[in-house]
């Protein structure tokens, strides 16, 4: 084969240097991975326990040993999740003490305005999508929903794990309340993750920044315009951006 | 030696006399009107000609003395004698006097020999007893385990439940302590003082002839269903101001779910999750308001501690009792339920609607862009 037979290089167009933007630290990506693993194990081992009266649960938990082991696995995964939660909170406290805790994730009134504008956009009442900062209101809602949801799961979970110890200090009535909360919150959190989070990061667009740690320049311009402008001092909107911010 | 020639007339007379007396015998045996002397049968009269003597005794090879006196009155009031069932029906080997030699050496052996006759008529109940806890005890070597006659009597068999309290007395002949507990319980008390037909006697829970071992894992996990036969009956419970929800609410509890799973899947595997009797007591069940009740508020903590050793005073409130969720009684549970009942649909519908709007918008945009 001669060189002339080689196909013409398809990438002969001028190369545009794509800048990439660091979005999540390695620590945050590990936290997320631990959350995925522990949450999935907890869900899969918890649901058969919640629905113990059903046929399929009794098919899965077909022997008392299986019930025992499913609880052991659930408790082990719970410890993993708890470690993740404590690391997250501890890290935030350390950063707070050093005055270095980022305020990006805290909800502001701007999020309410953004949500309102987004709703109007989705209802075709305006053609302008809101421009977002580092985290948009959907992402903040995901974070805080799981922040409190996991808080409820961890606290109620430990009440159910050690009810005899907990009631030495706290009223007994919290035990059945914890049982109800643990049972309900688990299902709500799981449905929320599937409907809300999976849609936003898998179906609407595949957003792997939580695994790669990075967002491309295009993604930054499109979805985090304010953050892009803050970081680069450039205008975010390019001609080719469609449906992006103004 | 004189030879007597019987005339035809005499022969006829004898023949008809024989026929008549046979007919009379058949009549006496088969028809059973109470006779003037109270005894239904000629055989009884015949037997009692000796056994009516209160001093009649014999000494068994074991050295035990057995009274052979049979009270005519006992026979008259028994269910058998007036029904025409004669001595020989049970004492099958004794046809006449002198009696054949005895084959048993002890009094107990004698009872265990004669009771076998019961199965001639009562074959179904007899078969049930062979599967019972009592038969197992006998097979294991305890010859004191009861046979038919120990509960029903021998010559004085009468309806076993007239009055109904007779049942607990009968069982109490051997199960003394249990009967003492029972007569002081809410069930036994009402039985003895009011002959209340709603309360259970021994046989209602334990069965009659096929009484099973109540200490098995299976009996344990079936206990809630046993109690529910009455305590889930709203009509019966309303007479006493009791809730008929106790069973349903128990089945939703931690204990109840666990026990229901074991009952359905592993009834023969022992499991500790509490059943009714663990908290309320077994034969000594009392009203919850009774200070001696195991579930009286004053005693509840120590009852919980039987399974949950070392728990503190707050622990009892972790058991919501057989009560529905209520803002006064169980505020934590109540407000948690209100929270989730309102939060769940709001969050889920808001998420669903928002995502649906996003999908719809994206679809419309795509169509719009594809248009010229």
Image (cartoon, rainbow, N blue to C red):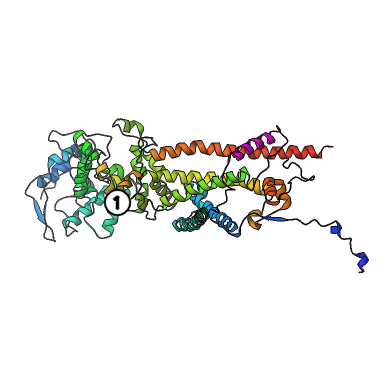
Residue most extreme to the bottom = A1
Q: Quadrant of residue B161?
A: top left
Q: Position of residue A238 (x, y in %)?
A: 77, 46
The one of B329 and B118 positioned closer to us in this rendering: B329
Q: Is residue B135 above or below residue A119?
A: below
Left-right relation of A231 to B213: right
Q: Residue furthest left?
A: B55
Quarter of the rendering occupied by the C terminus of chain A = top right
Asked if residue A56 lies in the magenta stretch, the reply is: no
Q: Is residue B209 visible?
A: no
Q: Chain of mark 1?
A: B
Residue plotted at (35% across, 52% down): A164
Q: Nearer the viewer, residue A144 or B177?
A: A144
Coordinates of residue B284 in the picture (x, y in percent): 24, 44
Dot 1 alpha-carbon crowd within 10 angstroms: few under 14, some 14 to 19, many 20 or more = some
* Figure quadrant of the N terminus of chain A: bottom right
Residue at 24% in and 43% down: B298
Q: Position of residue A126 (x, y in %)?
A: 71, 33
Span colored in magenta: A104-132
In this figure, what is the number of numbered marks?
A: 1
Please say whether residue B295 is visible from this viewpoint.
yes
Estimate the x, y position of residue B372 in percent, counting from the top left: 85, 37
SS class, disc 1:
helix
**Mark 1, residue position:** B305
Q: Quadrant of residue B199?
A: top left
Q: Is residue A122 magenta?
A: yes
Residue B371 horizontal side relative to residue B90, left or right: right
């Amino acid at each position: 084969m001669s060189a002339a037979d080689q196909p013409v290089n398809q990438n002969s167009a001028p190369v545009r240097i794509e800048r990439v933007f660091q979005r999540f630290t390695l620590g945050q990506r590990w936290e997320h991975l631990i959350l995925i693993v522990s949450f999935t194990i907890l869900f899969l081992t918890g649901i058969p326990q919640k629905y113990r009266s059903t046929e399929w649960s009794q098919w899965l938990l077909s022997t008392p040993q299986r019930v025992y082991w499913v609880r052991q696995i659930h408790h082990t995964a719970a410890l993993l999740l708890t470690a993740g939660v404590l690391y997250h909170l501890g890290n935030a406290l350390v950063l707070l003490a050093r005055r270095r805790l980022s305020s990006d994730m805290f909800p502001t009134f701007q999020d309410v305005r953004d949500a309102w504008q987004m709703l109007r956009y989705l209802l075709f009442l305006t053609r302008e999508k809101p421009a977002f900062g580092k985290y948009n209101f959907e992402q903040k809602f995901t974070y805080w929903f799981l922040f409190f949801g996991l808080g409820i799961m961890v606290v109620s979970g430990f009440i159910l794990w050690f009810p005899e110890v907990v009631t030495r200090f706290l009223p007994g009535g919290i035990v059945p309340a914890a049982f109800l909360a643990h049972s309900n919150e688990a299902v709500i959190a799981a449905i929320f993750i599937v409907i809300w989070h999976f849609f936003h990061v898998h179906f609407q667009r595949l957003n792997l920044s939580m695994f790669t740690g990075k967002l491309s320049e295009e993604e930054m311009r499109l979805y985090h315009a304010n953050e892009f402008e803050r970081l680069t001092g450039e205008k975010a909107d390019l001609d080719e951006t469609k449906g992006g911010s103004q | 030696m004189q030879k007597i020639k019987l005339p035809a007339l005499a022969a006829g007379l004898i023949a008809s006399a024989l026929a008549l007396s046979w007919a009379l015998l058949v009549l006496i045996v088969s028809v059973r009107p109470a006779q003037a002397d109270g005894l239904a049968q000629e055989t009884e009269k015949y037997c009692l000609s000796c056994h009516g003597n209160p001093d009649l005794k014999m000494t068994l090879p074991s050295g035990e003395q057995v009274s052979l006196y049979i009270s005519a009155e006992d026979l008259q009031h028994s269910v058998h004698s007036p029904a025409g069932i004669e001595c020989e029906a049970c004492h099958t080997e004794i046809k006449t006097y002198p009696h054949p030699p005895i084959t048993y050496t002890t009094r107990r052996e004698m009872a265990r020999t004669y009771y076998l006759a019961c199965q001639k008529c009562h074959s179904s109940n007899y078969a049930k007893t062979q599967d019972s806890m009592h038969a197992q005890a006998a097979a294991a070597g305890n010859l004191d385990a009861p046979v038919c006659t120990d509960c029903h009597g021998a010559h004085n068999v009468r309806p076993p439940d007239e009055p109904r309290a007779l049942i607990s007395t009968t069982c109490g002949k051997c199960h003394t302590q249990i009967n003492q507990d029972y007569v002081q319980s809410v069930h036994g008390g009402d039985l003895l003082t009011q002959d209340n037909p709603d309360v259970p006697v021994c046989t209602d829970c334990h069965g009659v002839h096929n009484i099973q071992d109540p200490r098995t894992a299976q009996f344990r996990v079936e206990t809630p269903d046993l109690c529910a036969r009455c305590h889930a009956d709203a009509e019966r419970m309303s007479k006493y101001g009791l809730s008929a929800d106790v069973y349903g609410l128990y089945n939703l509890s931690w204990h109840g779910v666990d026990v229901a799973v074991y009952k359905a899947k592993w009834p023969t595997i022992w499991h500790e999750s509490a059943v009714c009797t663990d908290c309320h007591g077994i034969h000594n069940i009392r009203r919850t308001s009774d200070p001696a009740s195991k579930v009286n508020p004053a005693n509840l903590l120590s009852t919980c501690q039987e399974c949950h050793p070392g728990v503190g005073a707050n622990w009892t409130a972790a058991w919501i009792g057989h009560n529905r969720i209520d803002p006064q009684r169980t505020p934590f549970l109540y407000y948690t339920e209100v929270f989730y009942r309102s939060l769940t649909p709001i969050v889920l519908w808001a998420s669903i609607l928002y995502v649906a709007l996003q999908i719809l918008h994206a679809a419309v945009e795509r169509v719009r862009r594809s248009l010229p």
